[in-house]
Structure formats: C-alpha cells, structure tokens
Image (cartoon, rainbow, N blue to C red):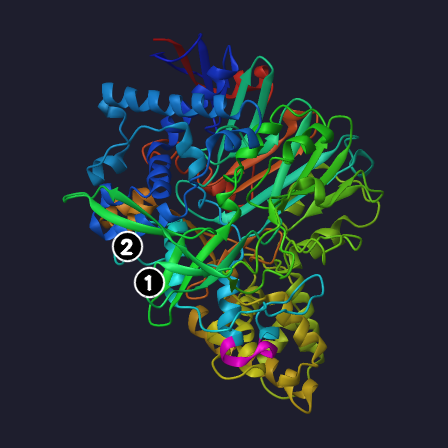
Amino acid sequence: MKIENESIALPGLEAGAEILIDRWGIPHIYAGTQHDAFFLQGFNAARDRLWQIDLWRKRGLGLLAGDLGEGYVERDRAARLLLYRGEMAPEWASYGAEAEARTTAFVAGINAYIDLVEREPARLPMEFRALGTKPLKWSAEDVVRCRAHARVRNLDQEVARSNIVAQFGVAADRLHKGLQPEWTLQLPEGLEPHAIPPEVLRTYLLGCEPHPIDSATPAEPLANTGEWGSNNWALAPSRTTTGRAILASDPHRVHDQPSLRYVAHLVAPGLNVIGAGEPAIPGVSLGHNEKLAFSLTIHPSDQEDLYVYELNEADPELYRYGEGWERMRVVTESVPVRGGAPAEIEMRFTRHGPVLHIDAPARRAYALRSVWWEPGTAAYMASLGYLTAANFSEYQAALEGWGAPSTNHVVADVEGHIAWQAAAKIPVRPNWDGLMPVPGDGSHEWAGTIQASTLPRSLDPACGWVGSANQMNLPANFDHRRHKTGFEWTDVARYMRLSESLAGEKRWSVEETLKLQTDVLSVPARRLCALLAAAKGEGATEARALLAGWDHRVAAESGPAALFEIWFTNHLMPAIPQALGPEGLARMVGVVDTQLYLELLEAANDPGFGAEPVAARDALLLATLAAAWYEARKRLGDDVSAWAWGSIHQGYFSHPLSRLAPPELAARLDVGPAPKGGSNLTINNNGYRGTDFRVMSGVSWRMVLDVGNWDASWTINSPGQSGDPASAHYRDLFPIWARDGYVPMLYSRDAIEGAAEKRIRLTPG
C-alpha cells in the first residue's frame, strides 16, 4: 500500500514524532516523551474532530450564544449553572499525579492545531465556514470544569416520583419504577409532596442537552430516547479456546455524527495504550496497554439530589436553614452574543448548589446538589490514572479517584486474571433514600461520600467470567441499607441473555465472542410470547400465529420481530399504567420501566387487574396485539411475508447542522440509513424512537480483545473516525457497522506499518 506523507513543524513539541494513520482512520502516535504523546493526541483530535470538540467546549462552558445568537443565552446560563466552581488543586489530584500535566499538554496540542488553521485556512472545517464562526483556544481547566457531558442520576426520577405521589399517592409509584434491591419508598421527613414546577427539569436538561443546535426551538431540550446502557464481559483462560483471557466491550449512547467516541493509540517511553475515549478528553477510557485490558459500563448509582427551600416572605433571597435564614449567593456573568451586546445573566446558589428555579408565589426555591460540585467528578478523567496499570491491584488504586459517571469496570490481564469493580463517588444519605426531593433546611445533609473501595468487586470467580449490562448487580452481602447507592436500575434483559449464554463450561473463541456481542435474541420477547401462547380469549388470531413460530431474534429481516417491537413499544408498554393505574398516571411515568411491567404481566397479581387478574391480563395482551397488527399493516403493507424489521428500524447518524442545511448539504453531513436488527433490550443494543423506529441510541463503538495477542483484537467506530465530511474516514465504517462487522485494532509497530495509509512527521517548530 502506498503511504501518503506529510511533514509539519509544530511549535510546542519537545522532540520529533510521527502519527501513522491506518486504513480505518485510527491514529497511532509515536512520541519521544509522554508530554509529546498527549500534546499530539490533542493536535490529532483537532485534526479529525475540531468542530465537534469546539462545540463540546462552547456548550459546556455556556458560550453557544457567541456563535449562534441570543436564542442560546438561556441555554448558556443553564450550562454555567452546572459548571464545577471548586478548587483546582484537589480536582487535579483526584485524577492522578500526571493528570494536570497530561491535560495541559493535550489542550496545548489542540491550540497548536488551531494556530495551524490560522496559518493555513484551508484546514478550517466546513462547519465553521457554514456558520461563519471560528474555533477558540482551550485551557486545561475547560476539560474538567464541564461536568454535564455525561449525566449522573436521578433528578428526573425524583421529579417524576414527587409529581406522582403528590397527585395519586405513594401506592401509584409502584407503576413508575421498580426498586432494587427490595425497598419501600420512604417519604422524607418535612417534605410536603407537591408537583415540581416544570422549569426545574427544563433548566437542568438545557444545561445537559447533548444536541444544542436545533433550528426550530433552540431553547427546547430534545425528547428523551430512553435508557442507553452498555455491555462488557471478560472470560478467563479456562473459558476460552485461546488459552488467554478475552475481553468484550460495547458502551451505548445517543447516535450522533461525528461519533461520540474516537479511537487512538499513544506510544511514548513508559506508555503504550490504545482504545477509545471521547475526543475532547485526554487518554482513553476503554482499551488496553501492554499488560491490561479495561472496559466500563454505567453502574446506575444515585449521585444527585433535589433540594426544596422555604423562602422568606419579606426577602425571597433568603432561604430557611436550621433555626434561621441564609442568603443565596448571586453570581453575575457576561455571555457573548453574536450580532449583539453581551447578555448579563444572574445565577443563584445555595449552600447545596445552583438554584434551578424559584417559585415566587409558592415561596419555594429548588437547587441541585450533585457530586459534580465535588472534586474528581469530571466524566472519565480518572481513566488517566489507569493508563499504565499492569494488574487489577494497580487499576483499583486508580479507581479510588473515579467520581463520575458511576461505572462497572471489567478488566483482564496477560496473566489470565479477570475482575469486576464498581466505581463512583456516591453520597452518604443518613436519613433518606434519595428517591424523592428533600427539604433544604439542613435536615437532610450528606455525611460525606463513598468511593470504589466501599463498592463491590469480584476477582477470578469460579464460573470463569465477569460481566455487566447495567443490571442490578449489588451482591447479597452488600449492605444496601447502610450504603444506599441507588435503587433504580436498567432492564435486566441484556444481562439475562449474556449470563445464559456464558453459563456452563463452554470455551469461547474470539470469533464466537464477536457473534455474542452482536446477538439479537430478545429475552422479553421470549417471555411475552410464552404469556401470549397461554392467553385465553379471542382476537388477534393472525398476529398470534405469526409470533407463535418466531425464534425471538430481533433480526433485521424478520417480520415477526417488526410486529413484536411495534406491539411492545407503541401498544403494550404504554397500556400497562393506563390499565393498572389512575387516569393521568401514564403521562407522568415518562420512560417506562420495561422490566417492572413485564414482571407485573407475568405475576398478574396487581390490584389494578381487578377481581379476575389473569383474564384481565390476557385481555390486555390480546387487545394491544390487535392494535399493533393494525399499525404493522399500515406501516409495512398487507403482504405479511414481506415484512422486515430492518425496513423501519434503520441506523442513521445525524449531524447537528443538517437541520439547518439545504438538502444537498444535509446529505453530505448525515450518514445512513441502513437496516439494523436488535433493540435496546438485546445485547446488540439499537434503541429507537416509537414514532418512526429510527435507531437513535445504542452501540456505535465496539471492542473485542484477545488479551496478550493484541494484534488479533477487533473494533468498530461508526460512522467513521473523522468528523470532516470531506474525509474518506467520515463514513467508511458505517456499512461495516451496519452489517455488524469489525476492523482490526492493531497494536504492534510492524502490523501498523503494514496497514498504514498516511504518515505525518512532526518536528519542533
């Protein structure tokens, strides 16, 4: 293969270096010092993703109005409310001894590329040209002060639960969210349950919104697409055909273009690490070094609380605290506005955190307390501490600084050890469970936080594997009444399929692991079809017949899969709170708890089913299935033999500017569509919206590692590594991802040289 060569003189570089870019767009950075490795990681991230990371920074710091106009001032104010405003010394120390230096080098590399663009304007990405904007320089603090790029939880559930309890009573919350481990909702002492004003959640979501550009209503958050989730697992050598450990990882998030993640390889004295991370963050959070493979999923812990304050009637800047009153702190800042004068904004803070809303007529204020205000909770930054870890013990030591998001870490080393460790900074709530808002009067204060060393772990279990899929995985001996880490978890379906597949003594090859990672068997479909087969009653005859012969695989070519998903999402799940709860409850539930609802259907003992619960349950199944059959025929046509799930369930990566662009430009920016199998409840996670079944979230990056035989490892990053629409790597991986394929993730210099398509030589300038 002929290699393209480029030479760049680069001020700020300590010594000569080079970047080899392989045929799949993965950069392999070879530097003479670790400073230069991180400097060039930042430089290269800007080379491939400058507009994306510039938007990331401006959104996080509340600077969008400077580019996009006064309609974004409200959004900028919300983002600034959620910034870290604490001391920087403990912040940097949380992420390891080298974190500040590495981040400083990383942003210097970004800035060096911005300087290069100034010298060579042809390098400026097309998005800046289209908007008439330019990239701004970074400081190291920008990377960590932006907290809201990876949500913590559970503010939205607290708001929903308070609204439900206020209108319908505590009993109605049984249809909102299942609590695990077994727990009875406790109303916080001193709290008067009431409907939380919608402005509370609106402000919070505006500050967290991952899609800040929307042509129609720039100040409106986009719709929730449901749970995201992730999978990871590791197999011990006793369970593989290679005699080495195998590690698999596929984190899931909302699908965007450019992709959320970026694969990079950093090589310098004492450092040789490859994997994926977010392009605006130094290092990698999922990948491997010479000795250790590492991965993560979300471990759904409760890391934030909504505080409700009584305001002083004579002076609404005062809120009750203890026996007296405390004054809110007012911070005034200036927001640049494109085409106009800067906007002066006011932000208020209590001792607990930013004030999201003041309800003057009710004399109430609402503020957020979050681990975000604590040092060490910038998303994924603690991964800098484990880049050179050689074993689980060293990895654990680094995780003690892990704050957010709350995560399950699965690792495997070249000696054959495998391990799982939960990691997060989680508040200690002595006298409440975190499920409802609480009074801000001092009666409900955090008693410090716990870290990874208090959370569960497993090393080399006898079964020969460890894994997670966001399921409730607190072991029976974990004292959840003392350490109330959280009671709201993701549907167990993906983990059930993973655990039933890995049960027993079968030895797995790398190829079989790749197939399991793209598995589309739906455990909920299997359980519901069993109920349907036994249901007594008339109706939905054709639909029942179609599902009766189905193998429960949500394959792109499957007609029964299309019927099932239409039934499950648009008919059966929404009907359950309507049937079992009081009128109006369904509107308050929000994203439905599919695991809870499936268990309610199987048990058929909820009081909402009435005097003949089994008959009522069966009638609900058949009535909703009949409605789904009608919808399926409208969407897919009368020829049932031609139905295919992939004809409506399609992968599509939308660029933020395509909403604003003319059709011909939008076609260059967006990538897709392509038929996809799976759902958000299959291991091959491809979550969708019910309006048109377009894939909106799930897996876009995957990795399977043959631990120690690193060149035999695989990855995919859809739609492509580059964020430049003119690049060959903007969309080249999309068709491979669409057919559930992979590309090599090469590690050795010889293998990389053989697959290289471009060499960038860099010298100090």
Q: Is residue 747 above or below residue 467?
A: above
What is the crowding at mark 1: few (fewer than 14 residues within 10 Å), some, or many (at least 20)? few
> In the visual, does 89 lie left or right of 318?
right
**Mark 2 neighbour density, 10 Å: few (under 14) some (14–19) many (20 or more):** some
Closer to us: 650 or 763 = 763
Along the line of sight, which residue is nearer the eye, 637 or 706?
A: 706
Looking at the image, which residue sits at the far front?
323
Instruction: Report x, y in % for residue 266.
Output: 53, 21
Q: Residue 544: which disc?
A: none
Q: CA distance from mark 2 to mark 1?
A: 34 Å
State the extent of the magenta-drawn residues as a range: 166-172
Asked if residue 648 shows in the view, the reply is: no
The residue that mark 1 highlights is 315
User: Viewed as shown, does residue 460 lie left or right of 7?
Assistant: right
The answer to which image quadrant residue 465 occupies is: top right
Residue under label 2: 218
**Which residue is painted at 35% across and 68% down in the image?**
313
Q: Main secondary structure of the magenta part?
A: helix
Q: Earlier in the sequence, mark 2 or mark 1?
A: 2
Q: Is residue 169 one of those drawn in magenta?
A: yes
- SS for callout 2: loop
